[in-house]
Image (cartoon, rainbow, N blue to C red):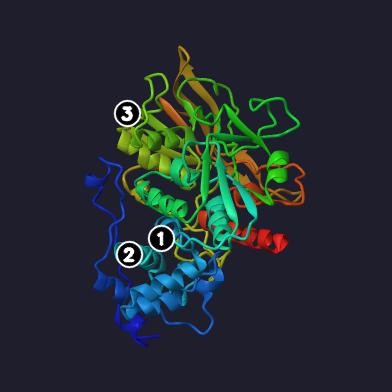
Amino acid sequence: MGNPRGFLEVERKEAGYRPIHDRIHDFGEVEQTLNSNDRRLQASRCMDCGVPFCHWACPLGNKPPEWNDALYRGDWQLAYELLTETNDFPEFTGRICPALCEKACVLNLMEHEPTTNREDEAAIIEHAFGEDYVKPHVPERNGKKVAVVGAGPAGLTAATRLNQKGYTVTVYDAREDAGGLLRYGIPNFKLIKSIIDRRLNLLREEGIIFEFGVKLVDSKKKSADDKGEIAANIQNDPTLGKDKTVTIDKLSADYDAVVVATGTPTARDLKIPGRDLKGVYFALEMLSQQNRKLAGQEFSRDELVNAKGKNVLVIGGGDTGSDCIGTAHRQGAKSVTQIEIMPKPPVGPDDPKNPWPNWPRTLKTTSSHEEGCVRRWNINSLEFLGKDGKLTGVKVQEITWVPNPEGGRPLMKPAKDPEIIPAEMVLLAMGFLRPQQPQFPANVFVAGDAASGASLVVRAMASGKEVAEKVDKLLK
């Protein structure tokens, strides 16, 4: 620890966001950066604890005390080397990770002002790219081949780990480019896509082969359009590969090992009366289309999912719902309301049910919420209302949760009379269904959300690392 009094002498300082009146007019990243001197001072606050709970909390096993100390001392290259020992893509996690490490920081227990690990991480990797520390490394090949199906964070992590071990890796994905939900789910104002492209160029230089527009299908089904599809797939996505298909049996025979990292393709639906009205969409229909538009793709008027001039209702209180709020603002929505069927979380910083160093389930207010949004909890959706086939509103009812006398999930009881929320657009952001994977051959492994259900990007990356080790162990 370079400065044993750093946490006493230096207050936590975050880079913060661009002003609201500025950022809502574009899709540029909302988060700002600190200058190098301030960033080093923030790194000096790390206490190099005897038991580093930050390391314990991080799914990747990152070691913030080590790279924070190097950063404080001004050795940016050493900080980069220490960081990338455990984290293959810190430019992603440094932007979108909820920073489990910071909630487990001892300074969060004592003062609720943890070390700025996530921002430090982002600063280290950006400095590394700027100073040309990041160079391609092409390993000596061992003669064995691995296929990775799905180019999201889990698939990319498994691919780069296996590639560096000497395997010839081919990554297949049903979409037109790599990144999974990093590219087609997370808005540019949180993660601009040039960051993904920069990393992909490096992975190609290191020898990873990418094949896009290839859909994974069940060999027992007749076609890719059949219900046997187990592909990397955003529901209702018209851009998925239609002509090129591949089966697990074929991949298993052609490659020494296969990693299935196809994510969670099926969004949770809300099948209430009026679901077929025009104006009711899955969240990713809006988010993926907006990202594609920013990448230069064009859509007809009938295809557009656009909030301009509309009252928008977001159903679902998680991060995807928050992304819908920010996107709706930038598209020019008239108003934005977000409803959640569960109770309002406690206002932090402490959560008595999940005490430190566990993740506190407290009220989260994102940059998108700050831009303007009515938020309501304990709201059940009853019916989508419309006229001439178009959505005009949603009938909802405030509810309360009561203990179940038989145990288990609490029971939902009406608390007030039904009401109508005016809306010309509804975005369903209620999560994803956990995939049910078939029985795979012995040389096929499942990673990320495809194995565990929807979770954090950092957990998907950790799963990719773990599966890469399993593949290497098998093939050795």
> Is 466 above or below relative to 376?
below
Q: CA distance from mark 3 to mark 2?
A: 42 Å
Q: Amino acid at mark 2?
A: Asp
What crowding class fits label 2: few (fewer than 14 Cα within 10 Å), some (14-19), or many (20 or more)?
A: few
Q: Amino acid at mark 1?
A: Gly
The residue positioned 51% from the left and 68% from the top of the image is 86
Question: Which residue ends up furthest to the bottom in the rendered image?
Answer: 4
The first of marks 3 and 2 along the sequence is 2
> Is 280 above or below relative to 410?
above
Q: CA distance from mark 3 to mark 1?
A: 31 Å
Kindly tell me whether residue 455 is visible in this rendering.
Answer: no
- Relative side of 413 to 124, left or right: right
Residue 393, image quadrant: top left
- Contact between labelled residues 2 and 3, with CB atoms less than 8 Å apart: no
The residue positioned 58% from the left and 53% from the top of the image is 168
At which x and y percent is residue 64?
45, 73
According to the image, label 2 marks what residue? Answer: 132
According to the image, label 3 marks what residue? Answer: 308
- Contact between labelled residues 1 and 3, with CB atoms less than 8 Å apart: no
- Relative side of 15 to 160, left or right: left
Decide which of 237, 317 is in the foreground and name it. Answer: 237
Decide which of 332, 217 is in the foreground and name it. Answer: 217
Decide which of 395, 362 is in the foreground and name it. Answer: 362
According to the image, label 1 marks what residue? Answer: 94
At which x and y percent is residue 372?
32, 43
Give the foreground label among 3 and 1: 1
Decide which of 226, 212 is in the foreground and name it. Answer: 212
Q: Amino acid at mark 3?
A: Lys
